Amino acid sequence: MIDNKNILVLGGDSRQTFLAKRLKDKGHNVYCYGFNLFDNTELNKISCLKEVKNRIDVLVLPIISSNDDKTVNAPFFDGEITLNEAITTLKQHSIVVGGNLSKSLKTLFFEHGHFSVDYYIRDELKIKNCIPTAEGALSIAIEEMPITVSGSKVLIIGFGRVAKACAKLFKALDSNVTVCARSINAFAWSELYGYKSVEIDKVDSSLSDYDLIINTVPAKILDKEKLSKIDKNALVIDLASKPGGVDFDNARQLGLKTIWALSLPGKVAPVTSGQIIADTILNILDERSDDSWQ
């Protein structure tokens, strides 16, 4: 275990407030800046970054650290925070943790003598985030479908972490779940869990059978040809990260109800999501040797 550190949580959405509280509860000295539209008296909010200049051991950036590689992503802040300004808060040889860190951002931190880690690519975060993602997809289905989830015919495209969580959840609610994938291993696991399965190259003939189609593959699987075969009353939910797996322009032209549900954990379960990120950060800090903090 590492000693308690001075941590600055910067920018982001409501997840950052719950992340900050989690880190504080673990005994760290946590300072917050960049989300002044959230009212949380439990947080130690600073009025400007100069208050903690050269005092911070760990800089925590949001799950989308920056949209332009120049400023911190801070949609709930009424000002602008430059990354160069954020770096002035750090002690020598500090650590920066953030989500979706670009190569240029990592280079920027390195050039200033700091170690950076992208927590968004960590397995523990991705695995734990599958649950709120699946529950978010279920929430959308319940709200948008004209029929019950129970008894509905659900096609899940892909069979990675998110797809497995979705399949398990919808199966538990008595949906008829079919997994669409390419690999033999996916079909074997699908059979073991009691799901039906169909090869991606053979799914066209059955697309009209489904009430709900959930895509988890970040590639244009549902192109114009496949979309044209989907029932007009069906709901299509795309859980894939950019560029997504649905041709949304053609889907609109065909009159299909499609929803690109990005960042569901932060929307449907910000408390849980923030705690997951915090625990991932704590793991990262624990992995740093004592010598790394000199």
Image: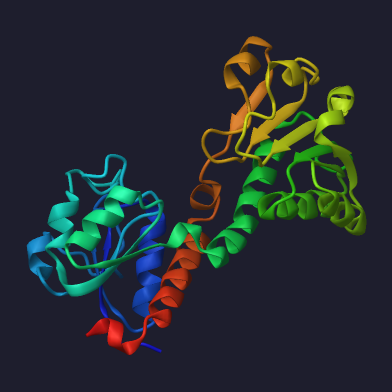
Where does the image place residue 121, in percent across and percent down from the top left? 49, 58
Where does the image place residue 49, in percent across and percent down from the top left? 12, 61
- In the picture, which quadrant includes the N terminus? bottom left
Residue at the image position 13 percent from the left and 55 percent from the top: 85
Residue at the image position 73 percent from the left and 19 percent from the top: 227
Residue at the image position 92 percent from the left and 53 percent from the top: 191
Report the side of 210 relative to 23 (left or right).
right
Residue 101 vertical position relative to residue 24 in the rendered view, above or below: above
| Quarter of the rendering containing residue 205 | top right
Residue 263 vertical position relative to residue 189 in the rendered view, above or below: above
Label tally = 0
Q: Nearer the viewer, residue 139 or 29?
A: 29
Residue 43 vertical position relative to residue 147 in the rendered view, above or below: below
Where does the image place residue 19, in percent across and percent down from the top left? 40, 66
Residue 60 visible to an observer of this rendering: yes
Residue 118 vertical position relative to residue 13 in the rendered view, above or below: below
Q: Nearer the viewer, residue 48 or 198?
A: 198
Where does the image place residue 119, in percent across and percent down from the top left? 44, 62
Q: Nearer the viewer, residue 132 or 191?
A: 191
Report the side of 35 relative to 223 (left or right).
left
Report the side of 96 relative to 194 (left or right).
left
- In the picture, which quadrant includes the C terminus? bottom left
In the rendered view, how is the structure colored?
A: rainbow
Residue at the image position 71 percent from the left and 37 percent from the top: 214
| Quarter of the rendering containing residue 287 | bottom left
Report the side of 144 relative to 290 (left or right).
right
Residue 33 visible to an observer of this rendering: no
